[in-house]
Amino acid sequence: MSTFDVTVFRANPDASLRRRTHKKSRDGCLACKKRRTKCGEERPGCVKCSNTKTACIYDTESSVQLRSSKTRLRDGPSLIPPGSLNTAAQTMAVDGVRIRLSDLFALDQHAPPASLSTVRLLQHFQSIASATLGDSTVQHVMSSHVAHNSWSQPYTMHMLLAVSSAHLQRLTRASTTPEESRRSTLAEAEHWHNGLALYRAALASPASRNPTAHNVDALIGTTFLSVIFAFALEDQIPANAFLTNYDEAVAHALSPLAAGSGILALDHAVPMQSAVAWMPVLRKGNDRVGTYTDQSPGTAGLPPAFVRLCGVDEQSCAVNNEYHSILRLLAPLLRLERSVEHFTKLIAFGGRTFGLFRPLLRKRDARALLLLAYWIALLRQLDQWWLNVRVRSSCAAIVTYLRTVGDPGVEALLAFPALGGEGGYEYLWDSPVEE
């Protein structure tokens, strides 16, 4: 026998070379699987989730057996199907989460106790929906911090569940009955209403004026969730919406901007060196030289087509031209390469301009409505499930209305919003402003 054979196949191997016996964790909880750590598989909740105060939810026995590794890669995590909680351990695990949710909702006297469907919504957010929101930085914070913070702030939990329900309804719309859809819509609206009421109360409380890392993270996370849900809520509006009820259509168009204004208020209250979890996201809303908040007077850097349309000259500023601030904030966004990684810059524009657009749109200013349509069309590049339908229907409704106002300057610039953000807008720079 060769030396190689003897070395590899010796009958009594040294104990130090033996592989230690170990038990693989095949049925660990979803949180440990997401963290890629070995789960102790304690029921109803594992030790690691207990230590990190994370909701410990186990996948169902049936779904574990049915899903092959190829199916996991193709379809992603599966949900707990109704009626599949068929073991005592699984029922105890879900009941534990449901009781914790009910205790949290007890802080809000208007909220009903949590149900099994509420637990499913929480699981859906943690395992699927959080990975569909915003750019990579936002997704990381949503999955690693927002779900955790929601256990201490009822308004965050309500908003999280509303967004999760909106996402789940879009995924299962074809397979749900009208009655199931009705119940889901009611639950979604209830979470939105309760979360919004508690969130507004939190913003008005003394604690929001003396921010700490904990409450700022919860407030900012809830603000982003409220912006997302505001876009997803009633995302399909008719093309004649501004013609049949202008005021209602304007309120619908401004609702995401109003939600986004909360981010700006908190942004100003938190030092940029603060160690809050959302700070990397907030920093992406601008650059080191303040390009995306610049309010320099004059026309430098502004698209010539908008300069002419809005009557801007070298002496124009926020004081003497009501469009100038909006143009200053919109212009750098028009020069960005299309990428979801510009998510924060694009969403922050809405919060920064809410107070500028509102008085103009209330008096039916066609130029302001055109500028709003350009921003909405720019959002198409983000390609988000909660945005795409809203962008197309809002742009169509605005363009339909603007074609009736009889302003040739406005009509000449409708191409980009008319395509719902799918085309280009190089024509804005084609004709330089005459000296």
Image: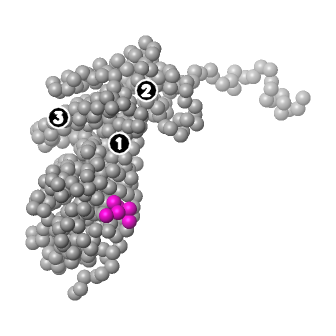
The residue lying at 31 percent from left, 43 percent from top is 277
Which quadrant: the N terminus? top right
Q: What is the CA distance from the residue labelled 1 to the residue labelled 3?
A: 22 Å
Q: Residues within 10 Å of mark 2 (few under 14, many from 20)?
A: many
Residue 419 is a magenta residue: yes
Q: Which mark is residue 141?
A: 1
Residue depth check, mark 2 versus mark 1: number of the one nearer the observer: 2
Front-most of residues 261 and 390: 390
Q: Nearer the viewer, residue 133 or 238?
A: 238
The amino acid beneath tag 1 is Val
Nearer the observer: mark 2 or 3; the answer is 2
Whether residue 255 is situated above or below residue 43 in the rendered picture? below
| Residue for badge 3 | 198
Residue 138 appearing in the image? no
Between the residue at mark 2 and the residue at mark 1, the CA separation in whole angstroms equals 24 Å
Which element carries disc 2, helix, strand or loop?
loop
User: Which residue matches tag 2?
Assistant: 80
Using the image as rendered, state which of residue 121 and residue 339 is in the foreground. 121
